Image (spheres, grey):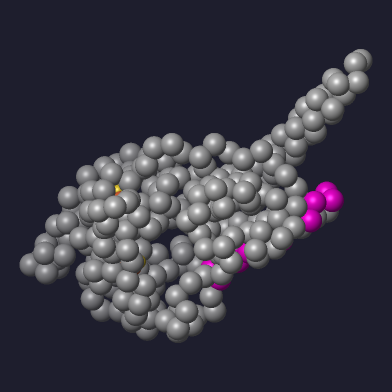
Amino acid sequence: MPKSARPRSSVRARLVRSDNLKNAVAQHVRALGGSVVGFAPVERWAAHGEVPESYRPEAIWPTARTVVVFGVPMLLPVLESTPSINYQEMYDTSNRLLDDIGYRLATWLCERGHATVFLPRDGYGSLDVLLENPFGSFSHTYAAKYAGLGTVGVSRNLLTPQWGPRVRFGSVFTAREFAGDRELSDELCNRCGICERLCPTQAIRARTDGIVGDLDKDACTRHHIELKKETRWPCGVCAKVCPVGEDRRLFDSRSTKRYLDERPALEANPADPRYRGLVHLRRHGSRGTRIV
Ligand code: SF4
Ligand code: SF4
């Protein structure tokens, strides 16, 4: 074999080995309960320039070469009942599952000789902390974008083809280099504005110079504090009403008109049969008494 061919074949062999491990990681995530998984080389944070430098993987853990991002869905009919104890329980369950997947995946990679750390799905200790400092230590939303799992919409949620914004994400940082997954080239957000219109605190404001809207984090957090007192949080209305996602077909819930009608219809008639199931869930298991 000519000398010049050796490095190329060794690079090819390394990539094949890397791809085998990548497939194994993706299978492992699925076996642990993840529904979507993607790989983002750390260079993508600097290439996009959207995330402040101190919040990028290389700043948080300089050994990181790849961020593996995984997500679990929020099932639409449960989310539609928000605010309800049913949604709160689903949210809490997804949080436990995300932390479990992250921790198990990190240790699984460490045991195979690849230094890896996991990040909790939320980087804050309480809602009061968020009022003082309204930033998590790391954005899984942008990590998921750079891992090719979706695009960021007006609501600032990550919209995915499969579940729209009804996915929650976790991430691990690994020292292992993996080929990045292709980022989505087309925006999924259609700027319909329904998230802005139905946000209970008018916290979302669409922008004219880009897709990603402005968010009044203080208003959003204060609303969550109220919901928590009712023992039925979080809010999630912006994720509930977004028309994007194949899950709408699965649950036969393609029209978003009933979300626009919901408040006036229930204020006029709390027994409106179109919302009977949602009202039933909102009336049980929490301190909240409002049905909208
Ligand atoms: S979570 Fe609720 S309050 Fe916060 S932005 Fe979304 S709809 Fe508005
Ligand atoms: S509800 Fe409409 S505007 Fe808001 S994120 Fe979804 S598609 Fe975009």
Say whether residue 279 is magenta.
no
Q: Is residue 251 above or below residue 223?
A: above
Question: Residue at position x 38%, y 81% from top?
Answer: 225
Residue 24 placement: quadrant: top right
Say whether residue 115 is magenta.
yes
Q: Position of residue 111 (x, y in %)?
A: 83, 53
Left or right for 39, reference 279: right
Question: Residue at position x 24%, y 69% from top?
Answer: 202
- Location of the C terminus (image quadrant): bottom left
Left or right for 64, reference 159: right
139 or 119: which is nearer to us? 139
Question: Residue at position x 85%, y 20% from top?
Answer: 5
- Location of the N terminus (image quadrant): top right
Left or right for 103, reference 138: right
Q: Position of residue 246 (x, y in %)?
A: 38, 40
Q: Is residue 151 above or below residue 115?
A: above
174 or 289: which is nearer to us? 174
Residue stretch in magenta: 112-123
